[in-house]
Image (cartoon, helix red, strand yellow):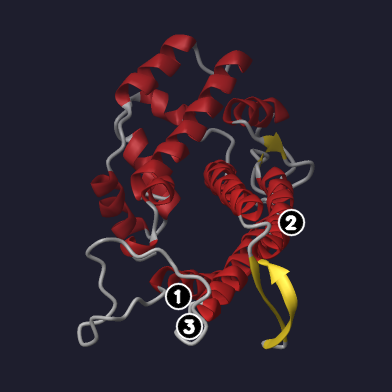
Amino acid sequence: MIERYSRHEMAKIWDEEHRAQVWLQVEMLALEAWVQLGLLSLEEYQKISNQVTLSLDRMKEIENITRHDVIAFLTSLTEQCGLESRFIHFGMTSSDMLDTAQAYLMKEAADLILEDCQKVLDSIKQKALKYRNTLMVGRTHGIHAEPTTFGLKMAMWYTEMQRNYHRFIQARENIRVGKISGAVGNYANIPPFVEQFVCEKLGLKRAEVSTQIIQRDRYAEFIWAMAMIGNSLEKFAMELRSLQRTEIHEVEEGFSSGQKGSSAMPHKKNPITGEQICGLSRVLRG
């Protein structure tokens, strides 16, 4: 995402270094589980923990040769250890680490989105109450119909966003699922305890059944729920943009001191935020 359209908090979640840190967290938690099962001693685990550090530059060097991001990541870890390196990624396949880490990252992102949705809901509710007696022209098909209130319009938006909020909570629940069940999902080389241990530590649920990967319908539902939020925000933005038209001018988007709308026409106060919301919602639908 272009930096100007990406919030710092969200960009930080999907930052390359943070993603690698979560990969490492999954691998180290798997080792903790193996300690409890007796595969390696606590001293061996602590030795690995003290030795391994992340180096994105080194990972990229190795990936240029292997052309495999997970092998590059694992090699960058194992080359820092001695004999204990044989325990890293023991019994796991790439997607055990990747999909579990991805679920954790998506859960982090979902928590941020839900927090922001609640702020939007609070703001709309406040305006619905504030403008409950503010008369305006009601329109159908874009044509004057009967009088209504701006507060009623806000109340409708509030109930729509409530539905989006609850849909996204469900999508978050279905996405926060990890799996560490091996190359075809049958625990042939790794006991279910490792999966259970890692998922509990990360705040994830275990996949009831998996193959090499977590099934992608979970991702599809998550993206769909985000797109529904985007659709509603676009609808609200389009309505405000229409009501801000010079010949209507019933509402106006905030315009800060020093903000400019045109290099040629100093009177312009363009609805730039509304336009950006509409554009980004199309990205979500795409």
- The circle drawn on residue 159 is 2
- The circle drawn on residue 227 is none
Q: Residue at x 70, y 46 (%)?
A: 169
Identity of the amino acid at label 3? Arg
* First-in-chain label (3 vs 1): 3
Q: Nearer the viewer, residue 44 or 9?
A: 9
Q: Nearer the viewer, residue 51 or 218?
A: 218
Crowd band around label 3 with a 10 angstrom C-alpha radius: few (<14), some (14–19), many (20+)? some
The C terminus lies in quadrant: bottom right
- The circle drawn on residue 245 is 3
Q: Is residue 209 left or right of residue 107?
A: right
Marks 1 and 2, how far apart in space? 23 Å
Compared to residue 130, the image places residue 277 above or below, namely: below
Compared to residue 190, the image places residue 153 above or below, namely: below
Q: Secondary structure at mark 3?
A: loop
Q: Is residue 115 left or right of residue 52?
A: right
Residue 159: percent from the left, percent from the top? 74, 56
Q: Residue at x 68, y 56 (%)?
A: 158
Q: Nearer the viewer, residue 76 or 139?
A: 139
Q: Nearer the viewer, residue 141 or 227?
A: 141
Q: Secondary structure at mark 2?
A: helix
Look at the numbered discs 3 and 1 and tell me whether their residues touch, using CB distance below 8 Å.
Answer: no
Question: Disc 1 designates what residue?
Answer: 275
Crowd band around label 2 with a 10 angstrom C-alpha radius: few (<14), some (14–19), many (20+)? some
Residue 96: percent from the left, percent from the top? 59, 43
The N terminus lies in quadrant: bottom left
Q: Residue at x 46, y 70 (%)?
A: 252
* First-in-chain label (1 vs 2): 2
Q: Is residue 286 visible?
A: no
Identity of the amino acid at label 1? Glu
